[in-house]
Image: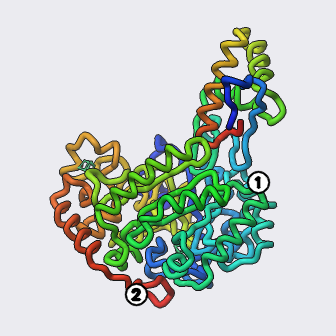
Amino acid sequence: MNADTTKTDITAIVPALPRGVRLRYDESRGQWFLLGPERVFEPDETAVEILQRVDGARSIAAIAQDLATAFEADRDEIAADVVQFLRGLADQRMIDL
Amino acid sequence: MSDVETLPRAAQARPELPPPMGLLAELTHRCSLRCPYCSNPLELDRRSSELSTDEWKRLIDEAAALGVLHIYFSGGEPMLRRDIAELVAHAHDAGLYTNMITSGVGFQPAALDAVAEAGLDHIQLSVQAVDARTCDRVAGYEGASTRKHAVAADIARLGLRLTVNAVVHRENVHQIRDFVQLAEDWGAARIEIAHVQYYGWGLVNRARLMPTRKQVEAAMADVEEARGRTAGRLVIDCVLPDYYARYPKACMGGWGARLMNVTPSGRVLPCHAAETIAGMTFDNVRDLSLSEIWYRSAAFNAFRGTEWMKEPCRSCARKELDFGGCRCQAMALAGDASATDPACSLSPLHEEVVALAEADAASGRSDFVYRGYQGV
Ligand code: SF4
Ligand code: SF4
């Protein structure tokens, strides 16, 4: 949350779902949801891939590396997307950075 | 078996309708506090009529199967139910996101440990004012404020996700900055600042609660300032009073569109104030499944879509945005639940309503009619 990207490498941060935020698949709609206090997010496919790798153990760099391998994409580009995506959620206290 | 028998009160089944997102489970109307704007009806359900543990569990299973994502354990004071931890655990195991809306008063700290242990995801703690004197006076309960501070400390100890619920009105609407500070001090991730809604007890007490237009404008500025100051730390959600606004609120995200509200004795309402609508009847989970009620009940279908609307809503470009405002407010102010919400500046009644609000705000009255089982 307080990472100053001008000085530290943000991709070294290990993101986590805080208590009170849950990623779940809903059978009745056939769809993933990210649930929080008075919040229902409907993550798209890419977002689901990212969120499934947020386990409180892997760093953003590791997540990006994993996605780059899985989808044969550029690691740095993916890392930038992941950072932007997670930042948006962190602003709403849906992810701890 | 004929269709008539299988679909007794049914209008038409609407299979294209998406399932509800949330279920508000009013476990009991019992509460130690007596807030003069309580959203419970003027006629409170008695303990003897409350749904049993097994009935709630069955209901929770039905909700999960129907596609409900969030369950809100509410009341009254939900923590007064002795089976509260059992119900939270049941909802958690059914895959629901579990919320508790509590006043903090009337239960032992151990009960909080038990619900945390049971898998509670999120707790909302109400606070009636930041200073103890006003808090206790509004709550109608000596020591309420002290108790809330103790509960907030327990919530922090348990690491539960906390939202502070602040209901604001003429006597505390100037405290927005202090409410926000309190939420930060308590380690909350979110604060909900909701202006009193004027039906039921709130309507009875409107002259004692209605803020002035100036107060409302100042409060809106305070909220904006606080959002800037706490960005990234605290989520600030604010429900505005709409008497002084140009357009009404999009009540409930549309009637029968997102939420179901179950009363302590099992009546299922499209919104918690729906029973103020004259002539509307409600199904009970003791008689019908939640799914039948969601898709087929007369009450849920009454104001779905836009077909029921009258002018000026019917030909208004905003009708899919605010759904014509609040049906209960239309009932309270226009005497007709299908009228345009008089909070809307396009309603022919709007000026009258604003004049009423201004007169109420200037009344200077402070003799609260507290909620209670004796009625008004
Ligand atoms: S609004 Fe006040 S009186 Fe009503 S249930 Fe909540 S705490 Fe109790
Ligand atoms: S006329 Fe009806 S639809 Fe149009 S803004 Fe007013 S309440 Fe909303």
Q: Does mark 2 fall on the same chain as mark 1?
A: yes
Q: Out of B222 and A19, give the one closest to the viewer.
A: B222
* Residue extending farthest right: A57
Please name the amino acid that badge 2 sits on: Val
Q: Which residue is mark 1?
A: B93
Disc nearer the start of the sequence (1/2): 1
Give the chain of mark 2: B
Q: Few, some or many C-alpha atoms within 10 Å of disc 2 (few <14, some 14-19, many ≥20)?
A: few
Q: Which residue is mark 2?
A: B376
In the image, what residue occupies the spot 68% across and 63% down? B58
Q: Which quadrant is the C terminus of chain B positioned in?
A: bottom left
In the image, what residue occupies the spot 39% across and 66% down? B197
Q: Residue B205, percent across and down? A: 37, 78
In the image, what residue occupies the spot 74% across and 34% down? A15
Q: Residue B304, percent across and down? A: 38, 51
In the image, what residue occupies the spot 42% across and 65% down? B173
When the figure is inspected, residue A56 is found, relative to residue B116, above or below; the finding is above
> Is ligand 1 less than 8 Å from the beta carbon at label 1?
no
Q: Residue B223, percent across and down? A: 45, 52
| Mark 1–mark 2 distance (CA, rounded to whole Å) | 41 Å
Marks 1 and 2 close (CB-CB < 8 Å)? no
Query: Looking at the image, can residue B289 be seen?
Result: no
Q: Which mark is residue B365?
A: none
Please name the amino acid that badge 1 sits on: Asp
Give the SS element for disc 1.
Answer: helix
Q: Splitting the image into 4 quarters, where does residue A18 fall?
A: top right
Q: Out of B224 and B256, give the one closest to the viewer.
A: B224
Q: Few, some or many C-alpha atoms within 10 Å of disc 1 (few <14, some 14-19, many ≥20)?
A: few
